[in-house]
Image: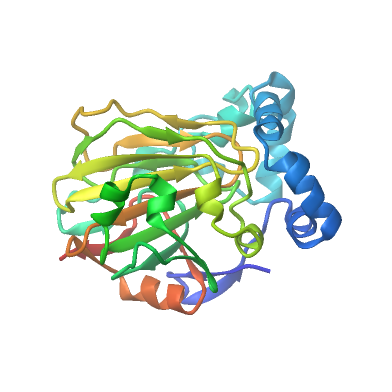
């Protein structure tokens, strides 16, 4: 059972986990772990899943998915009937007013929908995966020089579930570098997997880029692939100026994770999110929601 903090109600909600029993068996039993290592973590499994979700045969899953996870389709920019494949629905766009990005320069905003952990004054060699398991930013990036720039800074981890809006955005105006891609496995990013697989983010497929923002310095974006994520799609143009709230990219089908790092002194994170992180709970946030402020 995964409990997530709701900022609006000041209470906790139990997450409706897609394939929860399957994930628990996969990561928590001996036969499941054998299947995980032999098949599920590998590219072929996620590739086949992605191909199906891009086919017209997958369209029949859309209504069932909406009903199972109580998705509010009134937020969608397009009518549900216009989607010809499951992935077309999965990467749906929102009506602009549903995910507004405030232009006030001092506000630090969430890059997407999901469940958020955040830490300040980080040690780059001891980033928290879950309690008792850590990893190194150097291992994650494979770039010691870049990693060292974020010592003492802020780490934000945004976990996207299959039922979430899967497009992610720029938190400020500025320019973004070319994406660096690192090959890897396709472990789930569900907490059940994070508790069982050491250095999971460092083992999975991932991409990163440096966003030179107007108000928060050089922000490091890292997108992590996961089981059944057919692709991480970057839609921005490198080194071309973007505005706050402009789309950076999207994940195709599957749960995914967006990691964001800010340099020391760039911002303050909302105390409520920090407190919930310290207590071991993720905080539910939406794209454009205020998560902190300029220091």
Where does the image place residue 279, in percent across and percent down from the top left?
48, 79
**Left or right: 149, with 76 as reference point:** left
Residue ID at (55%, 39%): 184
Where does the image place residue 56, in percent across and percent down from the top left?
69, 20
Q: In this rendered view, identify the residue nearer to me: 282 or 89.
A: 282
**Left or right: 126, with 190 as reference point:** left
Question: In the rendered view of the protein, which quadrant contains the N terminus?
Answer: bottom right
Residue ID at (25%, 42%): 211
Query: Which colour scheme appears in the figure?
Result: rainbow
Q: In this rendered view, identify the residue nearer to me: 1 or 261.
A: 261
Reply above or below: 21 against 100: below
Question: In the rendered view of the protein, which quadrant contains the C terminus?
Answer: bottom left
Which residue ends up furthest to the right in the rendered image? Answer: 31
Q: Taking the image as drawn, is residue 80 in sight?
A: no
Q: In this rendered view, identify the residue nearer to me: 90 or 210.
A: 210
Quarter of the rendering containing residue 16: bottom right
**Numbered marks: total:** 0
Q: Taking the image as drawn, is residue 108 in sight?
A: yes
Residue ID at (64%, 30%): 86
Where does the image place residue 25, in percent across and percent down from the top left?
80, 58
**Left or right: 232, with 270 as reference point:** right
Quarter of the rendering containing residue 267: bottom left
Where does the image place residue 199, in percent across and percent down from the top left?
54, 57
């Amino acid at each position: 059972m995964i409990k997530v903090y709701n900022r609006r109600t000041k209470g906790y909600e139990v997450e409706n986990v897609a394939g929860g029993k399957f994930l628990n068996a996969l990561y928590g039993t001996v036969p499941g772990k054998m299947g995980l290592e032999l098949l599920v973590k590998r590219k072929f499994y996620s590739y086949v899943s992605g191909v199906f979700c891009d086919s017209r045969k997958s369209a029949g899953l859309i209504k069932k998915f909406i009903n199972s996870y109580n998705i509010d389709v009134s937020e969608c920019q397009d009518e549900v009937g216009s989607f010809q494949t499951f992935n077309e629905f999965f990467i749906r766009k929102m009506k602009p007013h549903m995910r507004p990005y405030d232009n006030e320069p001092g506000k630090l905003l969430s890059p997407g929908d999901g469940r958020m952990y955040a830490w300040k004054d980080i040690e780059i060699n001891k980033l928290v995966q879950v309690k008792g398991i850590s990893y190194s930013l150097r291992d994650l990036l494979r770039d010691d020089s870049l990693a060292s720039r974020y010592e003492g800074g802020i780490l934000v981890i945004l976990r996207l579930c299959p039922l979430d809006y899967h497009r992610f955005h720029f938190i400020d105006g500025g320019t973004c570098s070319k994406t660096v891609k690192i090959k890897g496995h396709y472990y789930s990013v569900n907490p059940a997997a994070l508790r069982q697989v050491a250095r999971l983010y460092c083992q999975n497929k991932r991409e990163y880029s440096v966003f030179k923002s107007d108000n928060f310095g050089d922000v490091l974006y890292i997108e992590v692939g996961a089981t059944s994520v057919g692709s991480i799609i970057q839609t921005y143009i490198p080194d071309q100026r973007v505005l706050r709230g402009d789309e950076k990219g999207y994940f195709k089908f599957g749960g995914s994770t967006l990691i964001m790092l800010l340099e020391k002194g760039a911002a303050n994170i909302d105390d409520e999110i920090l407190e919930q992180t310290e207590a071991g709970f993720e905080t539910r946030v939406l794209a454009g929601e205020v998560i902190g402020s300029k220091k």
